[in-house]
Image (cartoon, grey):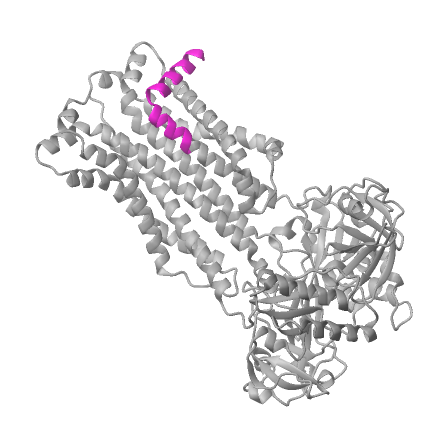
Amino acid sequence: MITILTRAYRSFLKNKFFASLNILGLATGMAVFMLISQYVKFENSYEDFVPEVSTLYRLNLDIYSNRELVKTTAENFPAAGPALKAAFPEVTGYSRLYNMGYKNNVIITYDDAKPEPVAFKQRRFLYADSAFLPMMGYKLMAGDVNTALAEPNTAVITAAYAKRYFGNEDPLGKTLHLQDDDNNNELAKVTGVIEAVPVNTHLKFDILFSYKTLYARQGTRPNYGIVRYDQSWRRNDMYTFIQVAPGTDARALESKFPGLVHRLNPDLEKANQDYVLSLQPLADIHLHSNLAEEPETNGDGRTVRFLGMIGLFVLVIAWINYINLSTAKAMERAKEVGVRKVMGAFRFQLISHFLTEAALVNLFSILVALAIVGAALPFFNTLSGLSLDAGYLLRPWFVVLVVLLWIGGTVLSGFYPAIVLSSFRPAVILKGKLKNSSRGIVLRKSLVVFQFTASVVLIAGTLIVYNQLNYMMSRNIGVDIEQVLVVERPGIGPQREGFTSEIDVFRNELKKDPSIQSVTASFTVPGVQREWKALVKRFGASDDQLVSVRSNSMDYEFTDVFKMKLVAGRTFSEAYTSDPDTAAIITESAAKLLGFKDAAAAVGETLNIPEWPWSPIVVGVVNDYHQVSLKRAMDPTIFFCTQYEGEFYSMRISTGNLSETIDHIKASWEKAFPGNPFDYFFLDDYFDQQYKNEHRFGTLFTAFAAVALAIGCLGLLGLSAYTVTQRTKEIGIRKVLGSSEGGIFVLLSKEYIKPVMLAIVLGMPLVYLLMNDWLNGFAYRTPIPVFVFIAAGLTVLLITLLTVSFQTLQAARANPIDSLRYE
């Protein structure tokens, strides 16, 4: 073994240039593969900390009206979980969560803090059944995980927020005070502290209140809280998780749900409605779910799959470089093989020797790759949105991956060169009659074709991704969201009767600043994922004419703030005092859906909405707009009129003195809504967050496509250097006979241009098939333009010429006398 290692070391010293190319190419390819593996592993690790994750499902809901799908949502009815548990022995448990931090503007305060109460706006706040924490495998730093949320008015809090609220005091037994914009006012005693919620869960939280706290809420009916939050099949606003017995067939269990749903809701058929419950594996939610009311923007399984393919492409390209350079250099080692065979070396000994060399190259490459990964982690975290550290490189799965890379790389990149080298016949070698085989040349060119086909696919794919992103970002969404600042409705305030005057104060204070051009309050704003749907029909039509539209509110300045176009009729106006009680505005697509021949025909017509207490008259029709991203189809919408029920206050501002304008908005807020934390966002930034997965994909795609092309060029550089070396005398003779430098350059370059041209031709249909599949995931997509193929082909061709020219021009300019003396 020591002899083999010594010979391998001498071989490295003799061929420093090619050895360096091999190690650099392999190391870069392996580093890219390792980084992408970290990303793919993390994205696929969601919920893997849950002990019995394979038995856990989220209960999703499809709502149908007149046999048409109205809504597909991640939330369900409060009564669904208990009903399934009672009806089916396969269901061993359930847990419900009410995502209050997402739905309402929640302020949670520690009133007893000194010198003054400590209050935070809580977005990651939920009410949770007592079964939730043990079901998900959470452990508590303090308190009993099984009973912490068993009683009403109890709370579990993360250690980070315990520190923010209570400092160094013991949080157990402390009381938190919840207030929100629905006038809820509740106290909860801290009974548990959790260290931290894992980052690889789709359901993140900072504070949990016990679900039974909801039962005490008061309404117009007796036992309102229990009926509303435990027994109701009317409002679907609870995440419901189901645990089943091991070995349960989820699809077979699902098939039993319709009978139960119809038995408990006998009026569904009469109303031409249906509720379809379905089970989604907990582990699938992050990468394979994009429903209404998701607790956060999920990942994209297709994106992760594409990036995994890129990582594999880059690794294979690096291995191909090694194979190409090793087999190309075989001629230079032929005499060594011939002498060793004459001295008695067996073929298996030669194979072992060359495999050992491959193992050493791969080992050095892995060490360099690990150094690259360690150095590149901060940059990679910025690109990917992850928070990986060096500790991730010591995890068992990654150590196993590195070992497999070494073994697999040694075998895949070293076996064929070892077979080729060990197959040389001593008599032929020592007589000097050995020549490069046509089969070997064809193989090397075939591998070059594969490398650059992959490069064409990656470059064209990058251009297509950015073309789609530019299309989505620049497309007119029907409303102008530039220079629109939004604040959410305050969580702490008086009852509704007093709240209206405070909103008036806020509006009036805002308008004292001329930079604030107009102000509106609405139920939602573009980018908010929550869906409020209403079933609508024309007055006098039968119930089978009900259609589903999105519902929103609008006041007198909404169209000014968002610059919507009035197509027919009028907007809401203070001059029409009955608008809040009688009027509605619809979008063009809603008018069409309701059967009006055009927008003007809808004006003055009465609509019937069973869930609304009045039948509104259409006073205007506005243009269609995108409430959410272009990944989903545009929804028809109906607006009702209210000045005071809006949950979002939007204002169009001029940005000339932005900091002063924001200071004025904050002062106006504090005057109108004292005690409420001030927070705001710009609507264009908020809306664009829906595309963060696509932006991330585009950035990673671009970075790794560039690396793949660079690795391919390293291999091409090595092959061109070897070709020049082998044809040195030929070049000298041609120059003596009158060949020009340009002619020599063309002669040497065309050997590589031909396979690259073939790679471009092969890559085009592959690009179309792969990227067309990706684009089909968008409701609104751009066609694949011809320029993408032209640009990708020209880029690869140009880079190939530049890479090859480095060696060929040097050879073409060499003194022919030196070339003819070359051995």
Answer yes or no: is residue 761 visible.
Answer: no
For the point 76% across and 69% down, the residue is 672
Residue 104 versus residue 144 in the image, above or below: below
Q: Is residue 13 magenta?
A: yes
Q: Is residue 370 magenta?
A: no
Q: Nearer the viewer, residue 671 or 547?
A: 671
For the point 59% across and 72% down, the residue is 635
**Magenta part of the protein: which range?**
1-25
Q: Nearer the viewer, residue 291 or 112?
A: 112
- x and y percentages locating residue 593 in the rendered image: 59, 80
For the point 44% across and 12% down, the residue is 2
The N terminus lies in quadrant: top left
Q: Nearer the viewer, residue 423 or 514?
A: 514
In the orientation shown, which residue stands out farthest toward the left? Answer: 737
Residue 254: image quadrant is bottom right
Q: Main secondary structure of the magenta part?
A: helix
